[in-house]
Structures are given as structure tokens and as C-alpha cells.
Amino acid sequence: MALQVFLGEQIRTFVKRNNLSQTKAAAFFGIQQPKISKIMGDDLDGMSIDYLLRIVAKTVGRLNYLFRQPRKLSRKEVEARIETA
């Protein structure tokens, strides 16, 4: 989900940086305007990471995303989180 949000933000940034209307952004990306409207409104429900990646790829930019593994939790921390869930 974090990657999906990140990709949506990259699309929004591109659209804003290039002063594109939603209609022009839709034409640029080759998608329908309502999809751009949803992306601009941060409503990414039903949009796969693959779909968003294809849109981002059309910007011809460079994509950098970093994921770091979480630290190992102690047994006590795990149990405490389970109890509060």
C-alpha cells in the first residue's frame, strides 16, 4: 500500500509541476480523465501498482523507492502488540 501511495504522489507531482489540467494529463498518460481526477484526489482504490507504474513510466523520469526491513521485535514487543490489537 505504501508503494501505491508513493506512485500516486509521483503522478500528482508531475501533473502539478507541468501545470497540466486533468484533461491534458489524461491525454498525456493515455487514460480517462476520471482516473486522473481520482489520482489527484488521492483515491487510489482499485488501481494496481502495475497500473500506476505504467503511468509513472510515461513521465520518462527516474523512479527511486527505498524499502527498509523493520527491525526485529522482541518477543515482549510482539506480545504487547497482539494484546492491544
Image (tube, rainbow, N blue to C red):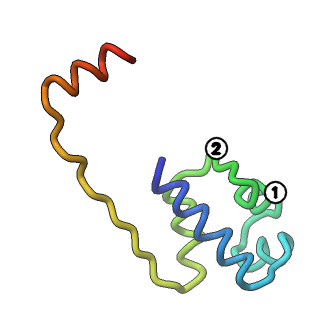
Q: Position of residue 67 (x, y in %)?
A: 32, 59
**2 left or right, relative to 45:** left
Q: Is residue 32 above or below residue 20?
A: above
Quarter holding residue 14: bottom right
Residue 48 disc label: none
Mark 2 neighbour density, 10 Å: few (under 14) some (14–19) many (20 or more): few
In the image, what residue occupies the spot 63% across and 70% down? 11
In-image side of 75 versus 21 (left or right): left
Disc 1, SS: helix
Do the residues bearing badges 1 and 2 touch, measured as CB atoms within 8 Å?
no
At 26% across and 20% down in the image, what residue appears? Answer: 80
Amino acid at dot 2: Asp
Residue 37, how many percent across, how many down?
Answer: 80, 59
Q: Residue at x 58, y 70 (%)?
A: 10
Name the residue rendered at 30%, 18% in the picture: 82
Q: Is residue 54 left or right of residue 76?
A: right
Q: Earlier in the sequence, mark 1 or mark 2?
A: 1
**Which residue is labeled 1 in the image?**
34
Q: Which amino acid, mark 1?
A: Pro
Q: Residues within 10 Å of mark 1 (few under 14, many from 20)?
A: few
Say above or below: 64 vs 48.
Answer: below
| Residue 28: % across, % down | 73, 80
How many discs mark residues in the rendered view?
2
* Image vertical order of residue 9 relative to residue 82, above or below: below
- Nearest the eye: 27 or 22: 22
Find numbered disc 2 in the image and state the secondary structure of the residue it sits on.
loop
Along the viewing direction, whichever of 27 and 41 lies nearer the viewer: 41
* Alpha-carbon span between mark 1 and mark 2: 13 Å
- Residue bearing mark 2: 45
48 relative to 83 in the view: left or right: right
